[in-house]
Image (cartoon, rainbow, N blue to C red):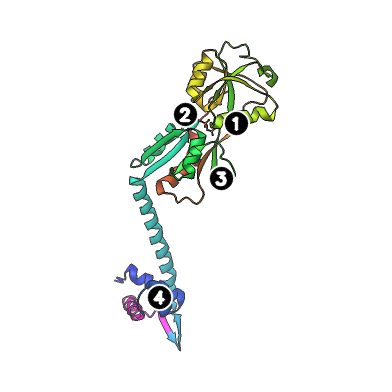
Amino acid sequence: MMNFTLRQLRIFEAVARHLSYTHAAQELHLTQPAVSMQIKQLEELVGLPLLEQIGKRTFLTQAGQEMYHYCRTIASQVDEARMVLNEMKGLKHGRLNITVASTANYFIPKILASFCARYPGVTVNLDVTNREVLLKKLESNETDLAIMGQPPPELPLKASAFMTNPLVIIAAPDHRLAGKSRIPLAALKDETFIMREEGSGTRIATERFFAERGVTLTSHMEMSSNEGIKQAVQAGLGLGLLSVHTLEMELQLKRLVILMVAGFPIPRNWYAVHAEGKRFSTVAQAFLDFIIKESPKLIKPPVM
Ligand code: PGA
């Protein structure tokens, strides 16, 4: 039986790589006699010389070359096993801190449910806020990961797009423009819009879209939630401009309709965002990978 130990293999691997007992000893923080002793014991266990000394130089024997080949494979397998097990440990008791834009919270629970079913030990701390607050949280390192619209390019953030986020104009079903096709933008100039609050990503995208086309919107009403806007639009207070992800139920129940306005929907994307250089926990990394891979399969935006 060749009962050599992992430690002996590690020492042999270092000597074989450096072809030097002294350098191997330095790398492993051992004395040179301790290294020589381990190699000698290993050679006895193997029953063949692994290294030979010619003059001042050390060479691998043929058996040593074979052994070196296997040692490298074993070392990398052991490292991989350690990494995988550590990851499992991290995922067993990990905590995920995520902050999502209020609009993203219409689909994030579904993704979280699927993620938590896969990693039942993970605890989730979810914060729902608007884009402006979210950017501050990223800046002050208060969150692992944020789900939001495209962040400003000048900030030191890393953003991965993972899903589309079309913005549409909604109206009550009895609105004069409901059911009409190819409505020109100009037809909206006398309409009242119920807008999201300052600092909302939806609001910024809306204002940019109309400003680029030289259209000024009339808005007498502002609300800090998508729900509020949907209720107000249903009640006939005006038109709204929201992400389709917020509309699943109202479209199904025909409480709201999407207006077919030229240039719409406004194309946007959802991004998973984190501070550049952020050292991810195993859980945060797993969630980032999960959301990029799984969300297009899990989330189907309502048919428009
Ligand atoms: P919200 O949406 O801030 O309007 O909720 C997020 C975004 O679109 O960035």
Judging by the rendered image, the residue that carries numbered circle 1 is: 205
Question: For this view, does 296 lie left or right of residue 284?
Answer: right
Dot 3 lies on which element?
Answer: loop
Residue at image location 43% in from the left, 39% down from the top: 98
Label 4 secondary element: helix
Question: Which span of residues is magenta-colored?
Answer: 32-52
74 lies left or right of 245: left
Q: Residue 31, position in %: x, y?
A: 35, 78
Residue located 46% across and 42% down the image: 145
Towards the viewer: 185 or 75:
185
Amino acid type assigned to the residue bearing label 2 in the image: Tyr
Q: Say whether residue 42 is magenta.
A: yes
The residues tagged by marks 3 and 1 sit, at their Cα atoms, a distance apart of 18 Å
Q: Tell me the mark number nearer the camera, choosing from 3 and 2.
A: 3
Q: Amino acid at mark 1?
A: Ala
Q: Position of residue 236 (x, y in %)?
A: 54, 12
Query: On the image, numbered disc 2 is attached to which residue?
Result: 106
Q: Where's residue 79, x and y in %?
A: 40, 60
> Is 285 situated above or below 228?
below
